[in-house]
Image (tube, rainbow, N blue to C red):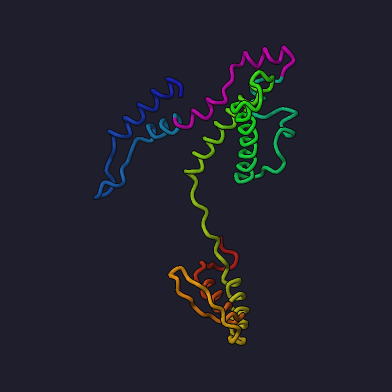
Amino acid sequence: MSEENQSRLEGAIEQLRNHQTQLDADGIMVGVSREALDMALAALSAPKAEVMEVDASLDQRMKAAGMIPLSDLLSGNTPLEKWMAHTGVCDLDTFEQWLLIRYREFMTMKVAYELGDKDEADELYEWVLAHAGAFGEVVSNFRAMKEFLPASPVPALTDEAVERAVQALRKIAETDKTGPIVYAEASDGMYYASHNSPGRFAEIALEALAAFPSKGEGQP
């Protein structure tokens, strides 16, 4: 964060902290200066823009040298950009898979040098070392980011889907339940007998299905 934005943020925080108007009996809701709030929000959003700022003179010099400007390189506005991305990467999960695969590849090669299986005088040593370090930093930050992601909710079944499953399982449960007896050893060392029949399995499935959340058809 630049010194200007840092100073602006500190001033806004000072205003927000020390100039509040109580709006309810408990003091939970307070009124603050809209200007101070806008200043704080602007200062907090500025770092993202600052990361992509490029000295205009660098772009001009690179263009004069027949090179792709740095601003275009950083934004991905290059002819090779679409060929550099893996076609299988389409979400966070597939990105993580690709990232860990590449990280493992370079770390495996790096360890081979460190164990003496390969000579560090090899012309590829510095290339492997640099890539292992770069991918390692990305992996560390990706893992840190995942700690802040909300847990994925258990998908709910629609009421119609649950009803269809219940009806099908009830038909199975009404069949013969006198199948062969199966003896199984439990964790307490005791042996328990149960009927190995479709009807009994259907009853167990019905009990499990009742524990699932449900929702109406078409609801989000």
Start-end of magenta stretch: 44-67
The percent coordinates of residue 123 (x first, y second) are 69, 19
Q: Residue at x 63, y 30 (%)?
A: 112
Q: Residue at x 68, y 20 (%)?
A: 122
Q: Residue at x 53, y 80 (%)?
A: 194
Q: Nearer the viewer, residue 199 or 164?
A: 199
Q: Nearer the viewer, residue 74 or 179?
A: 179
What is the chief secondary structure element of the magenta stretch? Answer: helix
**98 horizontally vs 215: left or right:** right
Q: Nearer the viewer, residue 63 or 194?
A: 194
Rendered view: 134 above or below 199: above
In the displayed image of the protein, which residue is found farthest to the left? 25
Quarter of the picture holding the C terminus: bottom right
Q: Is residue 48 magenta?
A: yes
Rendered view: 30 above or below 35: below
Q: Is residue 199 magenta?
A: no
Q: Nearer the viewer, residue 17 or 81?
A: 81
The percent coordinates of residue 82 (x first, y second) are 73, 34
**23 horizontally vs 108: left or right:** left
Residue 163 lies in quadrant:
bottom right
Rendered view: 76 above or below 23: above
| Count of numbered tags | 0
Q: Residue at x 29, y 46 (%)?
A: 23
The percent coordinates of residue 30 (x first, y second) are 31, 43
**181 horizontally vs 33: left or right:** right
Residue 83 lies in quadrant:
top right
